[in-house]
Image (cartoon, rainbow, N blue to C red):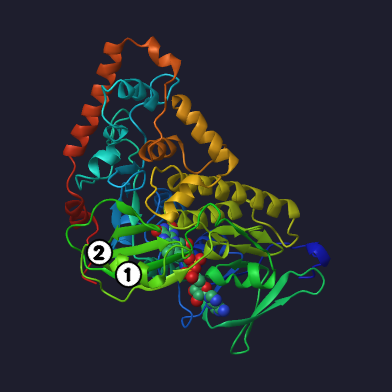
Amino acid sequence: MPVAPHGEVTGHDARIRRIVVVGGGSAGWMAAATLATYLGRGSSVRLVESEEIGIVGVGEASVPHLKTFNGEVLGIDEAEFLTATQGTFKLGIEFRDWGRIGDAYMHGFGRIGRSMGPLPFHQFWLKRFLAGHAPGIGAYTLQTVAAPQGRFTVGGSDASAGSPLADFAYAYHFDAGRYARFLRTLAERRGATRTEGRIVDVVRRAADGFVEAVVLESGERIEGDLFIDCSGFRALLIGQALEIDYVDWRQWLPCDRAMAVPSANAGPPTPYTRATARAAGWQWRIPLQHRTGNGYVYASEHLSDDEAAATLLAHLDGEALAEPRALRFTTGMRREFWSANVVALGLASGFMEPLESTSIYLVQSGLQRLLGLFPDLGFEPQLARRYNADTTFEYERIRDFLVLHYHATARDDSPFWTHCRTMPVPEALRETITMFQRDGRYFRHGDDFFALPSWVQVMLGQGIVPAGYHPVVDEMPEAHLDAFLARVREDIARAAAAMPTHQQFIDRYCKAPPA
Ligand SMILES: Cc1cc2nc3c(=O)[nH]c(=O)nc-3n(C[C@H](O)[C@H](O)[C@H](O)COP(=O)(O)OP(=O)(O)OC[C@H]3O[C@@H](n4cnc5c(N)ncnc54)[C@H](O)[C@@H]3O)c2cc1C
């Protein structure tokens, strides 16, 4: 295909025929599976990975959108996926010791309460809560009531519109390595091919700098029209070859290391992730069917690797199944995610740390955006500009939500928390906090990934209690208000009590063979 400088196509068929995916971690196989499913008839999808280099192998908690990606985008059967990946269900994240030592709250998926007229539910609750007549907001979300009880079920199509089970949101915990293998099987079945080998060179076209080929250690040259860089932190194409720089966010998200270790299960798996704040960061606990994933995410400026490993090992529920493994990262994102004929996904595109399990979602969202803006060989620059603008917006809003967890704290027991509490935060976040502090108002910014229930739960959980509430709430007689709140709470309590335990549900629905 003759292509002029700057990607101007001179031939008649401008369709992209050769897609090369660099890297075979979750991002690479998610990309290969998606592209083979939607473009595989007209284009070849070839994935190159190096077993010797391996994958990052963490990334085991998700957000509810993965259900759509697996089910609707890829047509994967949910039970089959969970069985293959030793997966469990996730109703949210329990945060311990974040606002203050001894605090605990749950950021649950799904909606809070029941909407009434023009106001979000939490405004009605706020009036009675501030007066000391209502319990914490956690009593009004089914996920945050069911999770601590260890209960789970799926809503099912028979859940009526008013039922707390209607549109019941949940996510998954799964074994990252198994997920990549599961997707590999699916992608190969749909026509993607895999090449084993270490890439040692990236060849660019002299005329416009577009990537022409990657070269393997064996000397094999793999040419492509479009390259998807899923090479992880190495960022072989977007970073090393195209030299797109990295926007460093450590001034807001100061953790730059993680120590990870699997442990034996000490009981039935909880239907939620736990994130416990520690002196220089936080520790995750992700329950799978065959083991529990654990990690301490910390700031190397405040803690040594040895101290992190010792703290992690001292706070496991069950026996450690391996030596702790250290991972290094820099929180931030690429200044451009799509440059020339390279689109970066996964860790090659940025990493904001795993606090709200958003990385795999960002791969999914990048793929959906790429499909919508899919170019031809002309690589119309407007497509990349749009892709980059929308992706940047998504990253920055997720960043602010993560920063909220660190910043809105009363903790002053370590230099790390004092730094987080007193650091200047991005302006949009400052405005969001100020508005909420006044009278509990929250306004979503555009297509901000995290919606009102997430912001409200986390702001309250971190100790931001509004001084007042929306004036419209006073229009409702107090007796009606109390009856409304009580009804919502009772419906939720009843729905939670009727659920099977998480373990019973797994046994029935997706029990995996022993690992
Ligand atoms: C501590 C930590 C915890 C995390 N927790 C979560 C979580 O709970 N939820 C979540 O959504 N995300 C989480 N993530 C992020 C998640 O792990 C990644 O987004 C996801 O696994 C995708 O990784 P990847 O495919 O981009 O990179 P990788 O898994 O690192 O894959 C990179 C691939 O590139 C290949 N490669 C690299 N260089 C070459 C070369 N020269 N030649 C050939 N092949 C090459 C490698 O072989 C590999 O196949 C976490 C990340 C970290 C660091």
* Circle nearer the N terminus (1, 2): 1
Specify the quadrant that holds the N terminus.
bottom right
Instruction: Specify the quadrant of the image occupied by residue 198.
Output: bottom right
Q: Which residue is mark 2?
A: 316
Q: Quadrant of residue 247?
A: bottom right
Q: Are marks 1 and 2 in contact (CB under 8 Å)?
A: yes
**Which residue: 47% across, 59% down?**
255
Which quadrant of the view contains residue 295? Answer: bottom left
Of 18 and 51, which appears nearest the observer? 51
Viewer can see residue 10: no
> Quick one: SS at disc 2?
loop
The number of numbered badges drawn on the structure is 2
Beta carbon at label 2 within 8 Å of ligand 1: no
From mark 1 to mark 2, how far is it between C-alphas? 9 Å
x and y, in percent, of residue 39 in the image: 57, 61
What kind of element bears circle 1? Answer: strand
Which residue type does callout 2 highlight?
Leu
Question: Residue tagged by mark 1?
Answer: 261
Position above or below: 21 against 486 = below
Q: Position of residue 212 (x, y in %)?
A: 71, 74
Q: Residues within 10 Å of mark 2 (few under 14, many from 20)?
A: many
- Relative to 227, 476 lies left or right: left
Residue for point 45% across, 20% down: 118
Q: Is residue 230 visible?
A: yes
Residue drawn at (44%, 19%), measured in percent from left and top? 470
